[in-house]
Amino acid sequence: MVQLEQRIEELEMKLAFQESTIEALDQQVIKLHHVVVEQQEKLRVLISKIQQVEPSNIASQAEETPPPHY
């Protein structure tokens, strides 16, 4: 009977450790999610600012000089 109680105690300790680890990992995932969301928003703002400063590097068809004829 002592061996069974010891095994149950070991399983309870392992379960408690696993629950603690899962909770810590869950909190880390939540933090990382917030970081990703913040970075995505900053990237959107940056892209918007870049587009306002320099709408396009490619000239429109009307602005293109005609190619030389041989």
Image: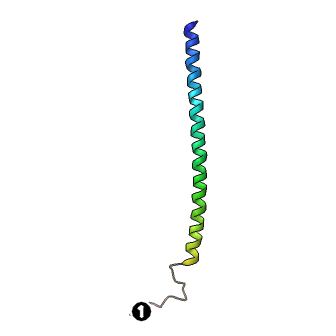
- 4 vs 37: above or below: above
Question: Which residue position is annotated with label 1?
Answer: 68
- 68 vs 43: above or below: below
Can the viewer see residue 55?
Answer: no
* Residue 50, position as x, y percentages in the image: 55, 73
What amino acid does circle 1 point to?
Pro
| Nearer to us in this view, 67 or 34 | 34
- 7 vs 68: above or below: above
Q: Quadrant of the C terminus?
A: bottom left
Q: How is the rendered protein coloured?
A: rainbow
Can the viewer see residue 47?
Answer: yes
- 59 vs 49: above or below: below
* Residue 38, position as x, y percentages in the image: 60, 57
Residue occupying the far top of the picture: 1
* Residue 7, position as x, y percentages in the image: 55, 15
| Nearer to us in this view, 9 or 65 | 9
Density class for disc 1 (Cα within 10 Å; few <14, some 14-19, many ≥20) is few
Q: Residue at x 60, y 42 (%)?
A: 27
* Residue 13, position as x, y percentages in the image: 57, 22
Q: Residue at x 56, y 34 (%)?
A: 21
